[in-house]
Amino acid sequence: FCNGGDLADYLQAQRTLSEDTIAIFFRQIAAALRACHERNVVHRDLKPQNILLSHPDKSNPRVQDIVLKVADFGFARFLSEGVMAGTLCGSPMYMAPEVIRSLQYDGKADLWSVGTIMYQCLTG
């Protein structure tokens, strides 16, 4: 159960996030992504709506108490070592250039998505 909505809702309420908040949040996102990639799973649809927030039942939780969880693995794919994907899927605003151009890609495409999300958190 994730009682804090998603990162898109949180960002809409906050407008932008401080660098400290971004560091706390993206450390968690990076750890989740690392766990996926170590198991050869590429998410392929990382976006703020697919990052859920959970926190202790408080009306105004501290940022340090918020736990982020990557969700919606509907487009995720298992890639054997050295194999690359080529399917166009995901949300265009967060897609890596190689995905948009229908070129071969791997887990690095997820990193591009993380970068676009971070940029959005910084700039609103």
Image (cartoon, rainbow, N blue to C red):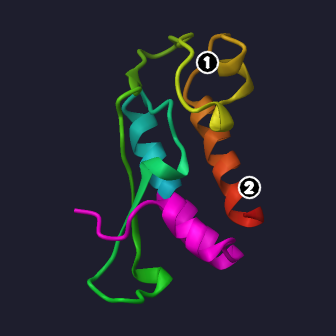
Please give the residue where the numbered disc 2 appears in the rendered image.
119
Going 53% across and 66% down the picture, which residue do you hit? 25
Residue 87's disc number: none
Q: Amino acid at mark 2?
A: Tyr
Residue 56 spot, x, y in % from top left: 28, 82
The correct choice, above or below, for 1 with respect to 98 in the image is below
Residue 16: x and y in percent read 69, 71
- Would you say residue 27 is visible in this rendering? no
Crowd rating for badge 2 (residues with CA inside 10 Å; few <14, some 14–19, many 20+): few
- According to the picture, the residue beneath numbered tag 1 turns out to be 105
Which residue appears at 57% of the width and 10% of the height? 86
Which range is magenta?
1-28
Dots 1, 2 in contact, CB < 8 A: no
Magenta segment includes 84: no
Viewer-closest of 65 and 35:
65
Among numbered discs 1 and 2, the one appearing first in the sequence? 1
Disc 1/disc 2 C-alpha distance (Å)? 22 Å
